[in-house]
Each structure stands twice: as C-alpha cells, then as structure tokens.
C-alpha cells in the first residue's frame, strides 16, 4: 500500500468503487441520473457521511452515482487537466 489513496476524495473513491461493482451498464457516464437523486447523494457526502450506495434509490438509478462523479470534476476550482499543462496534453 503506497498511501497515495488518501489523496483521492471520498466521494470519488466511494462512487467509483460502487460503479465498478454494480455499474456495468451501457452509458454509465454518458447517461445522467435523476437530478433529485444526484442532489440527495451530494447532500449525503456534503454532510460528512459516507452514504450507503446499496440503497434501492441508488441501485435503481445507478446513473446518479456516475453523474455525481462528473459533477465533482465540473466544479473543481481548476480543471483536472490543468491550464499549465494544457499544451502538453493537446
């Protein structure tokens, strides 16, 4: 164990593990979840809880978990592929 996993935000860690286990469906990151489910899940993470993603609400709308991951990346103060490294990436 290298210890680098501590730098991964809990929301991403929980959601990606859940998707890898339960989300083998077409368009898991392409299709959007139900907005109210995404907000409910976001609120649970914002409340410093680790939500139970195996609840029926999330199992039945698995796309809300993928949508929360996308939302997290969209709301980062700096892009994941930073402005400073943009030229190297392109």
Image: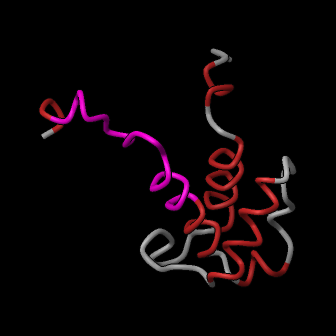
User: Looking at the image, which residue sits at the far front?
Assistant: 77
Q: In percent of the image, x 68 and y 25: which residue is there? A: 6
Q: In percent of the image, x 82 and y 60: which residue is there? A: 44
Q: Position of residue 68 (x, y in %)?
A: 60, 63
In the rendered image, the quadrant that contains the N terminus is top right
Give the total number of marks visible in the rendering.
0
Look at the picture and state if 15 lies above or below 35: above
User: Looking at the image, which residue sits at the far top?
Assistant: 2
Q: Position of residue 53 (x, y in %)?
A: 80, 64
Q: Position of residue 12 (x, y in %)?
A: 62, 48
Task: Tell me where the magenta segment starts and ends, as one range.
Answer: 69-86
| Residue 26 placement, left or right of 10 | left
In the rendered image, the quadrant that contains the C terminus is top left
Look at the picture and state if 83 lies above or below 13: above
Q: In percent of the image, x 77 and y 53: which residue is there? A: 46
| Residue 65 placement, left or right of 46 | left
Look at the picture and state if 14 lies above or below 26: above
Q: Quarter of the image holding residue 80?
A: top left
Q: Indicate whether residue 19 is drawn in magenta.
A: no
| Residue 82 placement, left or right of 23 | left
């Amino acid at each position: 164990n290298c210890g680098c996993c501590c730098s991964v935000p809990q929301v991403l860690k929980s959601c990606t593990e859940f998707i890898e286990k339960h989300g083998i469906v077409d368009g898991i990151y392409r299709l959007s979840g139900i907005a109210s489910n995404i907000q409910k899940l976001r609120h649970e993470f914002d409340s410093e809880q680790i939500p139970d993603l195996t609840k029926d609400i999330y199992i039945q709308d698995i796309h809300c978990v993928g949508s929360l991951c996308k939302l997290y990346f969209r709301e980062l103060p700096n892009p994941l592929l930073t402005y400073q490294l943009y030229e190297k990436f392109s």
